[in-house]
Image (spheres, helix red, strand yellow):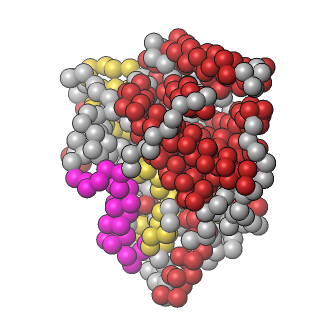
Amino acid sequence: MTRLFNDPAAFPLELIDGFVAAHADEVMAVPGGVVRSTAYDEVAVIVGGGTGHYPAFCGLVGEGVAHAAAMGNIFSSPSAQQAYSVARAADRGHGVIFTFGNYAGDVLHFGEAAERLRAEGVPTEIVLVTDDIASAPAGEEHRRRGIAGDLTVFKTLGAAAGAGYDLAETVRIGRHANDRTRSFGVAFAGCTLPGADAPLFTVPDGFMSLGLGIHGEPGISDVPIPPAADLAALLVERVLAERPTGAGDRVAVLLNGLGTVKYEELFVVYATVSRLLAEAGLVVVSPDVGELCTSLDMAGISLTLFWLDDELERLWTSPSAAPAYRKGAASAAAALSPEERARVQDRAATPVHAPAAPGSDVSRAAAARVVDALDVLTRTVVDAADELGRIDAVAGDGDHGIGMERGARAALDAARAARDAGSGAGSVLTRAGTAWADVAGGTSGALWGAALRAVGDRFGDETAVTAPAIASAIQAARDEIARRGGAALGDKTMMDVLLPYADRVAALDPHDPAAWRDAAAAAMADADATRDLVPRVGRARPLAERSVGTPDAGATSLALIITAVTAHVLGATPKETPA
């Protein structure tokens, strides 16, 4: 169990406070994460992801590794605003690289942040980490997620930047490092989120789960726990089977503890790992054994092999001096002066919103109705949060209900503030969408934020919101989510509800209440029908068969919201959402 916390919702921010207090000579806090508090003049490498994985991500900010870390809620990607703010603070005029594990929420949020930076003239690139061989078969490496192999890519990128590589060359070597990295892991017990009364998954006594994910996802199958030597052999066999084409015989090795496996146990396993690699004709270079990428209190281990060439080996073995990753004799960097620290903070603290012009009288009236509808949406999500988390945990990380509640509450607060400031319906929804994405993070946060902003763009701040305008806005939200998320009908996602719902809305008479009710009822039926589907995208994909029989959490939450908001718009009386 994760036992030590105050308010579970404040856990990510409080751990950053403590981390910065413990390492004030190396890092400083900015909105969305941490940056180096020492001077540098090079390409900025920004790592990131959800909290709960220490030393990833903040512990890797330092000389020879990362320049900054964008940190989201527990097991949830940082929002686009957080990633953007951290990048603004870290940029020194040589370009920015975002690097992170290949998870849908991270791809969406970091991608949006990159678009904003490029639009401002900041050269920005993305280097994905796809080392987990359990998450997709050979030949589909682009679909794999990132786990402990993050470190080999982060270290290579940071070392290259520190050696004076320009942006294009740093990106090149980072992607090459990812292509040469393979990982496989097992779990003996699941992890528990702060404040939760049960772990995200369980493993039968005496068994281990093969192919775990670092966000609390269970493995793809359970087998009896073997002796340490046999487990070492299993790990080595699985990873060596994925040897990259053209790889040589020199490898870096990471044997990673995921939270509660003790160092002594790791060394027992590594003794056999080392011997087996030597027997396979490999030369181990600068290995690491310990906690390198964790999952809160998960009991588990993973093995990563990083096949080196001369350039990769030089970068991998170069000195580093991050709080949680120190190798060699890195020279001490000059501390930033108070004035320089203030400038870094100023770059990060850009406003989330530009000032909004007041809406017209009819649009302000519509804005009040929008806030009422968001209130209904939020109450619906709050009431369903536990059940949404339960069904999400069957084949995912179980955070859908928590993330939806967090995002909806933030959206409602932002919408109320915009309404009270005299904004029209469009600005109210735009502010709500930005707040949802920023606070919730994760895939659903990015998609719901984009959907609300798309609806807001269609409504605007001048004209009345009519039934035909609502129908048109639903099409706009569908198109934006399809563009960003990439999911199709049958993938077992929210699109299995949204696509047919948008088609029905496009065909109905927008002035016919019965037609809207029928469309909402059909959405609920579509959500229930996802229980028979096999997921083809997202975190549930590696556990596809396990999810059969359970509806998709994202589809379910969308259908519940459609039903509740439709009933409200057609005549229900709203009540205030509890704070």
Across and down, in percent, residue 427 comes to 68, 54
Residue 153, compared with residue 468, is above or below; it is below
Is residue 346 rendered to the left or right of residue 226?
right
Across and down, in percent, residue 456 comes to 70, 47
25 inside magenta stretch: yes
Residue 529, compared with residue 330, is above or below; it is above
Across and down, in percent, residue 225 comes to 25, 24
Q: 259 or 402, which lies in front? A: 402
Q: Main secondary structure of the magenta part?
A: helix
* Residue 237 visible in this rendered orientation of the protein: no
511 inside magenta stretch: no
Q: For the point 60% across and 58% down, which residue is it?
A: 418
Is residue 235 rendered to the left or right of residue 498?
left
Q: 224 or 397, which lies in front? A: 397
Residue 62, compared with residue 174, is above or below; it is below
* Residue 34 visible in this rendered orientation of the protein: yes
Q: For the point 62% across and 20% down, which residue is it?
A: 517
Residue 69, compared with residue 193, is above or below; it is below
Across and down, in percent, residue 268 comes to 24, 41
Q: For the point 27% across and 44% down, which residue is it?
A: 195
Q: Quadrant of residue 566 in the image?
A: top right
Which quadrant of the rendered structure holds the N terminus?
top left
Please give the count of numbered marks on the rendered protein.
0
Q: 573 or 492, which lies in front? A: 573
Task: Give the extent of the magenta segment.
Answer: 4-27
